[in-house]
């Protein structure tokens, strides 16, 4: 058996506004299903070159989507019984798909069944923005009052550790990715540990700036969605309300469940999808009482009009078409001499 993690995230904002109604997850699943049946290209390439592809695989009792990281370069090799290496037996046009499973639950919670190489939870936000023009803000679901504690914490130290064999820039983004990539080249055994602290020297202003910097790095770390790969993650500081010293264990307080899966079963696309749906539905039932106690109960019906149909190429293609239409209209207006004071073009998002 192999161990995988189920992370819990929540849609907090959509298009820059607080999301006070249920997220239109069923409409999203319908749009993806319609695009699949029509053969619409659903690939999206992020700014860092990662190619992603989503599909809907269930709508009841909860909508479940797959998000694949699509690879056609730097592919692994296959070895026979004697260890002789050969290329993966991919047909022309085939790609390697590394999958993460997303279930859209009540209270705008998303249960995310991860694997080592599948897209992180934050990638779903990138995909929804790139393909559909949605701008969701995803935040991790945490236990008890950790968010309140971190808000009050005047941080003085942040420290984490993980086994050297797990070191990879893929676990994080931005500056943390650079740190872990560099570390992976330095060592491949033992434990890698890093500690950031304010220190004892320097003026009060210097220490304030360092605290703010460490706090920002903690925020980036938590947003990465890969905390479960680490052995030890803590933040320490003074509670600005009580004056007490607090040590916050971010690894234990983050709401992550661990499940045992059959690795052979997860190598079969059909069986793995069915098993993932079963795992996510069970997690939803097992944790419903916790969500009901700690998260707001959203009222109203989802606004399905927020989710447009998918266009091949995503929002980049839509914006390019709108820009071309504006240019063509402007040229036509100049030709006809149709210039009026105060006239102009307004792009209306549908």
Image (cartoon, rainbow, N blue to C red):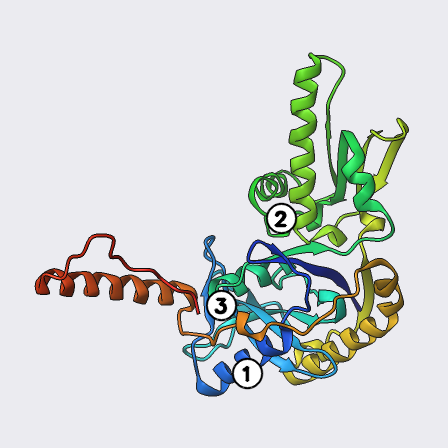
The residue where tag 3 is placed is 132
Q: Which mark is residue 113?
A: none
Looking at the picture, does residue 294 appear above or below residue 194? below
Indicate the position of residue 206 as horizontal and vertical percent values: 66, 17
Q: CA distance from mark 3 to mark 1?
A: 14 Å
Q: Nearer the viewer, mark 1 or mark 2?
A: 1
Where residue 76 sits, quadrant-wise, is bottom right
Looking at the picture, does residue 280 appear above or below residue 216? below
* SS under mark 3: helix
Q: Is residue 284 left or right of residue 192?
A: right
Q: Residue at x 39, y 63 (%)?
A: 316
Among numbered discs 1 and 2, the one appearing first in the sequence: 1
* SS under mark 1: helix
The residue where tag 1 is placed is 33
The residue where tag 2 is placed is 172
Q: Is residue 133 left or right of residue 218?
A: left
* SS under mark 2: loop
């Amino acid at each position: 058996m192999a161990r995988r993690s189920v992370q819990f995230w929540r849609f907090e904002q959509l298009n820059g506004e607080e999301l006070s109604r249920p997220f239109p997850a069923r409409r999203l699943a319908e749009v993806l299903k319609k695009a699949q049946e029509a053969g619409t290209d659903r690939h999206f390439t992020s700014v860092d070159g990662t190619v992603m592809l989503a599909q809907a695989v269930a709508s009841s009792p909860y909508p479940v989507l797959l998000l694949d990281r699509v690879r056609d370069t730097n592919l692994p090799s296959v070895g026979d019984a004697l260890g002789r290496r050969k290329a993966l037996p991919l047909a022309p046009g085939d790609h390697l798909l590394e999958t993460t499973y997303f279930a859209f639950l009540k209270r705008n919670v998303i249960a995310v069944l991860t694997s080592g190489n599948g897209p992180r939870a934050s990638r779903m936000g990138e995909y929804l923005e790139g393909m559909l023009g949605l701008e969701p803000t995803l935040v991790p679901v945490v236990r008890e009052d950790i968010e309140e504690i971190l808000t009050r914490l005047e941080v003085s130290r942040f420290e984490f550790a993980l086994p050297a064999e797990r070191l990879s820039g893929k676990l994080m983004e931005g500056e943390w990715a650079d740190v872990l990539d560099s570390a992976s080249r330095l060592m491949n055994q033992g434990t890698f540990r890093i500690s950031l602290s304010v220190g004892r020297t320097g003026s009060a202003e210097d220490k304030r700036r360092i605290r703010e910097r460490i706090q920002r790095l903690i925020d980036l770390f938590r947003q990465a969605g890969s905390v479960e790969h680490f052995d030890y993650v803590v933040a320490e500081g003074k509670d600005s309300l009580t004056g007490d010293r607090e040590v916050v264990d971010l690894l234990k307080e983050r709401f992550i469940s661990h499940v045992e899966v059959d690795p052979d079963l997860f190598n079969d696309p059909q069986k793995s999808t069915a098993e993932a749906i079963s795992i996510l539905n069970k997690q939803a039932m097992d944790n419903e009482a916790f969500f009901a106690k700690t998260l707001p109960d959203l009222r109203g019906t989802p606004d399905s009009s927020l989710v447009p149909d998918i266009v091949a190429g995503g929002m980049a293609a839509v914006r390019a078409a709108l820009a071309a239409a504006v240019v063509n209209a402007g040229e036509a207006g100049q030709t006809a001499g149709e210039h009026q004071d105060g006239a102009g073009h307004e792009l209306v998002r549908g």
